Image (tube, coloured by chain):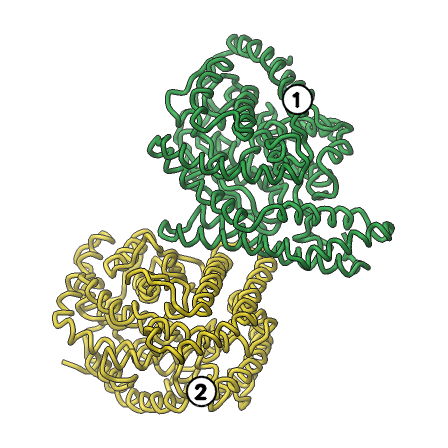
Chain colours: A yellow, B green
Amino acid sequence: MAKRKPHPSIAYTNLKSRFKNIGRLEAIAEIISRDFLTTMPEGAYEGRLDQISYLHRRIHDDIVSPEAQIHLEEAQEHMASYPNLWDEWDSANLKGMVKLYKTHAILDHDTMEESARIANEGRRIHRECLKNNDWEMAQAHLERVVKHVRKTAKKKAKFRNSATLYEALIQDYSPGVKLNELWSWFNHLNTELKKIMPLVIERQKSRKPIVSLAGGYSKEGQMWLNRSLLELLGFDYDRGGLYETGHSPVEGGTPDDTRLVIKNVDTKNFLDSMKSALHEGGHGLYIQGLPTKGGLSYQPVSFDLGTTMHESQALLVEMILGRTHEFFEFLAPRLEGLFHTVRDPSLTAANLYRIKTQVQPSLDRKRADELTYFFHIFLRFQIECDLIEGKMEVADIPAYWTEWMHDNLGVMPQNHMEGVMQDVHWFVGKFGYFQAYTLGHMVAAQLFDTLQQDIPDIFSRIRNGDFKPITKWLNRHIHSKGSIKPMDELLKDVTGFTPSPDFLISHIENRYLGE
Amino acid sequence: MAKRKPHPSIAYTNLKSRFKNIGRLEAIAEIISRDFLTTMPEGAYEGRLDQISYLHRRIHDDIVSPEAQIHLEEAQEHMASYPNLWDEWDSANLKGMVKLYKTHAILDHDTMEESARIANEGRRIHRECLKNNDWEMAQAHLERVVKHVRKTAKKKAKFRNSATLYEALIQDYSPGVKLNELWSWFNHLNTELKKIMPLVIERQKSRKPIVSLAGGYSKEGQMWLNRSLLELLGFDYDRGGLYETGHSPVEGGTPDDTRLVIKNVDTKNFLDSMKSALHEGGHGLYIQGLPTKGGLSYQPVSFDLGTTMHESQALLVEMILGRTHEFFEFLAPRLEGLFHTVRDPSLTAANLYRIKTQVQPSLDRKRADELTYFFHIFLRFQIECDLIEGKMEVADIPAYWTEWMHDNLGVMPQNHMEGVMQDVHWFVGKFGYFQAYTLGHMVAAQLFDTLQQDIPDIFSRIRNGDFKPITKWLNRHIHSKGSIKPMDELLKDVTGFTPSPDFLISHIENRYLGE
């Protein structure tokens, strides 16, 4: 994009400058939070938490300043009076500004500060709870979070005209998605996948048995592999990197500083760190591909389309492309060289494919297979629905969880670490997030469908490690578009359809029941 | 210190809250800058530079806001009317606030932003110049910096009633020190050390020859040693750490987050990384020991006393304690275990002492011995004096440098990397800083003199690795005092004298010509 001329609306030009400054502070908050979560010394905990919260308070104040309000009104009038002076980027940008302003204006800066505090300290509390299997501590914390989230949900629902409190929260992750749409998609998936699951399990029983991985895969070797795969995907290491950490992966970054962090590499199983690297890599490619040229840096129109689109990019790389047979055909011979093994029956393409496509109900969302993954989300989605609406309390979750897992997947957690405490999301206040994984999975499958039409030799390209055309396609159609259109419109432009669960169902049928 | 009651001056209470918030932003700037200098991906360079500069602009605006000015006036009136309601901490704190306000008020926020930009990008430019031995690039950059520094010096001199522009700059590093005092101290040192130097060199010629280090010292082993020495000194790893990096050491931090960074460990010479660790460790102990209890965190009275006192703490640990014979007696047997060598003649206490106390004129300030170190500073001090006053231009430095080194130390740089380009200070705008090394060395020797009286068995303690009483003493007398008094007053309280070069001269005579 060429350098853009100053816009004729002075109010809008002022706003662009304001949002540039806000974006600078946001980028700083991003780095500080990553430091907080990864390398900060333990003793800095309280002080840093306090600094981060304060920075978010300042950002909030900058967004909702009275001057910003006046400029927003003037710029909107200008756009209404001279629509031909507003191209699609500037129009979308102004809309994004208005939305950001309104989202912040309904929340006072104390609330913003508390949200930032919960988001940052929740991770640590989660770690503590898991370390000691301490449900009492978890419950106390979650009750505090739910109370805070219900309060903000009320404000958000009023301003957003949401059908329910929970629908209002979903907007933070999947803007524009209605709760009743979600229910109908998820109910459909539930019905179809429940039919497919036993067929797949039955069919997989007749396969040759899986050969377990032998273990002893050096950390250095795994990190080389993970970094190389991202390089083949087009990840730009001049503007980012891939690191490992002792705890949960850290997401986020900015287009010029996308440092991906995956959880500690396990020498027994290189597939786990690879999965994590591919997932975070998908996020990273989206971030690095956002539009920054022509003065768009830090402007709302240059932002990503939210969690659903973000997860779709991560899951497309990790779960869809990264579990094709062709991907393992590319991988297998290189693994022999990397790990110094020849004729290792566990490292054949066929065996690796079998490992990564085995369907088996389990307790752990993060390690769930591509098919049963949905059920983990559906459970959390239902709990969130009731919890936010006050139809369920935190204390009720464990019993509900256990029963639901038993009824739907036939497995039961033996402790809270295997159940309600496994995910960090609620601990950091992310209620309404989980649905974005399945919605993202749906979008990923939908994009993959079009990808196969646009790149007819996609599978032979994957077999050759020639991943860049895929990233290029994603960049052209999704990443470089920023927030120029809402997700459903963009998806319709690219695939011909608004979001639909049918693509995911077809994808799963093809992969697990095909041929 | 117990929790302090709210102060009766409401204006002052408001100011405390303002400075707390400013301190939070300063702490954030500290972390961001460290990230910028150490682990940030290269592609984030421009964006991050821009973010850091912007943050400093905001900090500046917060300090000089009209509201702050009103509160400062009210609080000062309150203190004048009710002096008995102001204890020494609050009085010193208010004075610190006024000083900070005035220092910022004379500089507009564009100037502050440019200073922050130079401070952060100068390191990189320095690295580039050194990599390519590019004096042309260095000269262009230094001319830009000097122009900027002269401009700010003019404003500072006017406000500070400084005798000269250069004296105004010195205040940033050694508050309260007069240029004519410095000249008289430095001239005295110059005269005395020029007498001592040939005697030491002559005497050392008759010693047994030094056995060179054998090399092959593992990085892990060295870092264990460095970390252990700091631990013995009382460095708190819960609130900090010691890391290595590919470029210049990074100073700074906050009391709860003191991450020290030393330059890459060299397997050929463990003494270099140890020297660097002890030096940064001395800085770190000062930072960690600053007063933070009782609501003093982020308040000006809790700040350190400036560069001179900071360098005194670093040099006391590195050059004075860390080069005693007793220190090497403690070290030697442990080195054998650490590096798996027995009866290695290079690792005896006597030989190590000889290595670290050998006096030999050289070109490299950072590797200079304790005696000739002064001459490196004196050269830079003289150049700065003339440069800032406009009696010398950047283009004139190399010739002056070469001639001066020849006349005073009998060595001549063969290229600019060995001469004018060796230090990063000028590249980042730190004119007036170098004198603080020698002044710090003077203060360190002066403190060491009192330390020996207060801890009569100090040398046997050092021989046993029992360093904590020393740190405790420093903490009680220096670190925990923050900025409650100006440096010369505090030094007089502790040692009985304001700064004097005689202690340094005696120390050098004792160590190099004694026994």
Residue A122 rendering spot, x and y as whole percentages: 53, 69
Q: Quadrant of the N terminus of chain A?
A: bottom left
From the viewer's perspective, tell me whether residue B465 is left or right of residue A497.
right
Q: Crowdedness of circle 2 by 10 Å Cα count: few (<14), some, many (20+)?
A: few
Q: Nearer the viewer, residue B469 or B363?
A: B363
Residue A178 rendering spot, x and y as whole percentages: 40, 87
Q: Nearer the viewer, residue B32 or A212?
A: B32
Q: Is residue A198 above or below residue B291?
A: below
Which amino acid does the dot numbered 2 rest on? Answer: Gln
The kind of secondary structure element at disc 2 is helix
Residue occupying the point 17% across, 61% down = A466
Residue occupying the point 78% across, 48% down = B91
Residue A319 rendering spot, x and y as whole percentages: 28, 72
Subunit ID for the residue under disc 1: B
The kind of secondary structure element at disc 1 is helix
From the viewer's perspective, tell me whether residue B476 is left or right of residue A219.
right
Q: Crowdedness of circle 1 by 10 Å Cα count: few (<14), some, many (20+)?
A: some
C-alpha separation, residue under disc 2 versus residue under disc 1: 77 Å
Mark 2–mark 1 contact, CB under 8 Å? no
Disc 2 and disc 1 on one polypeptide chain: no
Of labels 2 and 1, the one closer to you: 1
Which residue is denoted by mark 1 in the rendering? B185
Subunit ID for the residue under disc 2: A
Which residue is denoted by mark 2 in the rendering? A382
Which amino acid does the dot numbered 1 rest on? Answer: Trp
From the viewer's perspective, tell me whether residue A353 is left or right of residue A155.
left
